[in-house]
Image (cartoon, rainbow, N blue to C red):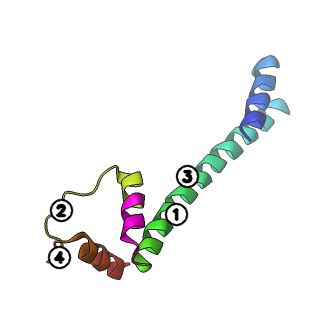
Amino acid sequence: MKEESISKHRLWKAAGRPRNGPVAPAMRKAKYEYKLLLKRKSYQAQTCFSNELHDALINKDFTQFWRSWNAKFGHRPQVQVTNGYSDHGSIAEAFSELC
């Protein structure tokens, strides 16, 4: 998609950057399809990450949960007490009950 968008843009530039005619709409269409693809991929990446966290919590795989968490947020949160729980396992379990 990216290569197609680039080639249509180059063709449009070579044609003198027309506003109308067959080249301009083809360039715009390729550009918007590429942007739409990027948005879809971004959404899928966010959804996939959420599913990873959810699956790790359901399976009570706290190691995988924290790996996924750290990949997204970079570090463990500096939380001392959450809903009355102070250890990571209990906090993760309480979090899983909310989902």
Packing grade of label 1 (10 A; few <14, some 14-19, many >=20) is few
**Label 1, label 4: how far apart the Cα atoms are:** 28 Å
**Label 3, label 1: how far apart the Cα atoms are:** 9 Å
Packing grade of label 2 (10 A; few <14, some 14-19, many >=20) is few
**Label 1, label 2: how far apart the Cα atoms are:** 25 Å
Indicate the amino acid at tag 1: Thr
> Circle 1 is placed at which residue position?
47
Q: Of the two numbered discs 2 and 3 on the same chain, state the one appearing first in sequence.
A: 3
Q: Of the two numbered discs 4 and 3 on the same chain, state the one appearing first in sequence.
A: 3
Is 80 magenta? The answer is no
- Along the line of sight, the residue nearer the viewer: 46 or 69: 69
Q: Position of residue 61 (x, y in %)?
A: 41, 73
> Circle 3 is placed at which residue position?
42
Which dot marks residue 80?
none
> Circle 4 is placed at which residue position?
85
Indicate the amino acid at tag 4: Tyr
Q: Residue at x 63, y 44 (%)?
A: 35
Indicate the amino acid at tag 2: Val
Choose mark 2 or mark 3, whichever is in front: 2
Classify residue 74 as left or right of residue 24. Answer: left
Start and end of the magenta stretch? 60-67
> Circle 2 is placed at which residue position?
79
Classify residue 97 as left or right of residue 44. Answer: left
**Label 4, label 3: how far apart the Cα atoms are:** 34 Å
Q: Residue at x 61, y 54 (%)?
A: 40
Q: Is residue 64 above or below residue 32?
A: below
Residue 87 visible in the snapshot: yes
Q: Secondary structure at mark 4?
A: loop
Q: Are marks 4 and 3 in contact (CB under 8 Å)?
A: no
